[in-house]
């Protein structure tokens, strides 16, 4: 059945009037079983061997991990191969993003990039690989870049031809079918002091449900309910979001329950440049998950691939023994706990369209070839100056084979402060099988939960 849906957050004009981008041919799709991985990365090693061949990723958990535990480090013996600092970064300039170079320059010896052996751990269930192949044959961007059709479960374009298609791959990448977890966010002051905000998150990812059909998911990508646990001034706040595929047919729906007013209200103020709640104006709403914005606000250009040192396999940051005080430092996180590796990334540049209002004039995204996860992004102001640098520190989860962020942070170059999300070490492991039925994510259900 051929079903059609329009772009996740709105119309995205790619500049090819009247032309639809077609799916790839069967012979090209067969590359996903040959020289490309099932989701479209280069299967082979790079010329120097510093990026190894993909051999299936971390598809099985380490022997010392048990169901219900926090993910353990599968590479506990790994040591940093070398450390990049402000003094030696000129030796690695071609392997560093502009944002990484700026962070090294700004913070001097207190900020460094420890580089480890590259481990291509990204892995997904076999049925996701099957859908990736199907999507390659059927998925299309509509006329004028106005949307996508004939895709389900995972990234639509494993063999992308445009920046638009790469961003779609990030937006619709597989993150499991449902997940429940608790974590904290913080906005440290210049001196490093902070007050965490703890939220409980429940996701029901309708688009990625096994055997789902577009006709069955009611135009939804996912449902999200967050419940604020602390501090006491915010405790009891509930946010409910229905993220829609076709924003023209049905825009994003959001409700917010404020414990003070004891009322559940529709939240129309989720504009993409709006400050992310509890971020101290250090991050916009559309930077959550590294990018979730309205693609019609930008023109997109695929700049090709690069080999870059990027955050990867962040098991030290995720370790159950780590506490927020171990992670948070003045100006930036504790880089001793970070891990960077050399990986191939797609580079996509977004330029704000004429007449569009957004705080960022230009943005650059570095997207992992093995997972379609954005790993680094750079945000520029109207004057063309680099304003903010965002990083996603990722791991492969074990209960469900998923490569996803464990921590995200946005560094404000001007303010010398940052926002960090994903401080989950104090809490139980992510549950990728909580058994949601879907009716827990209605407005009436959220209202009943709030009154309890």
Image (spheres, rainbow, N blue to C red):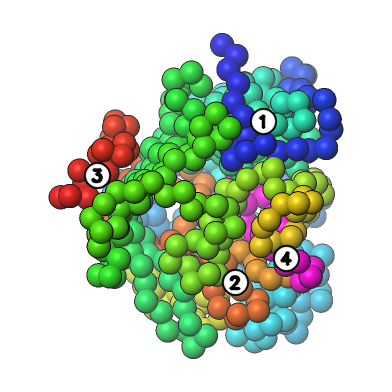
Left or right: 197, with 355 as reference point: left
- Which mark is in front, 2 or 4? 4
In terms of sequence position, does the residue under pointer 1 or pointer 2 come before the other? 1
The residue under label 4 is 380
In the picture, residue 372 is in which quadrant? Answer: top right
The residue under label 3 is 447
Q: Distance between the residues labelled 1 and 2?
A: 32 Å
In terms of sequence position, does the residue under pointer 2 or pointer 4 come before the other? 4
In terms of sequence position, does the residue under pointer 3 or pointer 2 come before the other? 2
Secondary structure under tag 1 reads strand
- The answer to the question of whether label 1 and label 4 lie on touching residues, with beta carbons closer than 8 A, is no
Left or right: 315, with 99 as reference point: left
The residue under label 1 is 147
- Which mark is in front, 4 or 3? 3
The residue under label 2 is 411
- The answer to the question of whether label 1 and label 2 lie on touching residues, with beta carbons closer than 8 A, is no
Find the magenta span and give its range.
363-385
Residue 120 vertical position relative to residue 376 in the rendered view, above or below = above
Secondary structure under tag 2 reads strand
Residue 128 vertical position relative to residue 340 in the rendered view, above or below = above
Closer-to-camera residue (24/319): 24
Density class for disc 1 (Cα within 10 Å; few <14, some 14-19, many ≥20) is: many
Density class for disc 3 (Cα within 10 Å; few <14, some 14-19, many ≥20) is: some
Q: Distance between the residues labelled 1 and 4?
A: 26 Å
């Amino acid at each position: 059945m051929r079903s059609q849906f329009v772009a996740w957050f709105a119309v995205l004009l790619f500049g090819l009037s009247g032309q639809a981008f077609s799916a790839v041919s069967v012979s090209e799709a067969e590359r996903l079983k040959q020289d490309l991985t099932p989701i479209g990365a280069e299967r082979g090693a790079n010329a120097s061997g510093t990026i190894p061949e993909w051999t299936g990723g971390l598809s099985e958990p380490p022997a010392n991990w048990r169901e219900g535990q926090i993910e353990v480090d599968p590479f506990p013996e790994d040591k940093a191969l070398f450390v990049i600092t402000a003094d030696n970064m000129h030796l690695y300039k071609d392997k560093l993003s502009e944002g990484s170079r700026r962070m090294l320059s700004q913070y001097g010896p207190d900020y460094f990039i420890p580089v480890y052996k590259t481990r291509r751990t990204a892995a997904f269930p076999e049925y996701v690989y099957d859908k990736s192949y199907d999507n390659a044959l059927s998925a299309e961007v509509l006329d004028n870049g106005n949307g996508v059709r004939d895709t389900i479960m995972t990234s639509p374009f494993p063999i992308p031809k445009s920046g638009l298609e790469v961003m779609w791959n990030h937006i619709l990448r597989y993150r499991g079918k449902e997940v429940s977890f608790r974590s904290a966010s913080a906005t440290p002051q210049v001196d490093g002091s902070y007050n965490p905000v703890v939220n409980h998150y429940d996701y029901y990812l309708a688009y990625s449900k096994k055997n789902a059909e577009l006709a069955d998911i009611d135009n939804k990508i996912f449902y999200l309910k967050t419940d604020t646990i602390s501090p006491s001034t915010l405790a009891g706040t509930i946010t409910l979001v229905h993220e829609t595929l076709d924003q023209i047919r049905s825009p994003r729906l959001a409700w917010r329950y404020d414990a003070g007013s004891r009322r559940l209200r529709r939240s129309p103020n989720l504009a993409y440049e709006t400050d992310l709640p509890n971020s101290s104006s250090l991050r916009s709403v559309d930077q959550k998950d590294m990018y979730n914005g309205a693609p019609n606000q930008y023109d997109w250009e695929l700049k090709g691939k690069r080999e870059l040192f990027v955050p990867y396999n962040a098991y030290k940051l995720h370790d159950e023994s780590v506490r927020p005080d171990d992670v948070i430092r003045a100006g930036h996180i504790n880089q001793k706990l970070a891990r960077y590796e050399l990986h191939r990334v797609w580079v996509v540049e977004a330029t704000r369209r004429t007449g569009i209002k957004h705080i960022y004039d230009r943005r650059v995204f570095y997207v992992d070839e093995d997972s379609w996860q954005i790993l680094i992004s750079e945000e520029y102001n109207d004057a063309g100056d680099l304003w903010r640098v965002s990083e996603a520190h990722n791991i492969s989860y074990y209960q469900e084979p998923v490569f996803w962020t464990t921590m995200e942070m946005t560094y404000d170059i001007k303010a010398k402060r940052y926002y960090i999300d994903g401080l989950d070490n104090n809490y139980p492991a992510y549950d990728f099988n909580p058994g949601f039925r879907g009716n827990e994510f209605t407005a009436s259900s959220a209202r009943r939960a709030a009154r309890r």
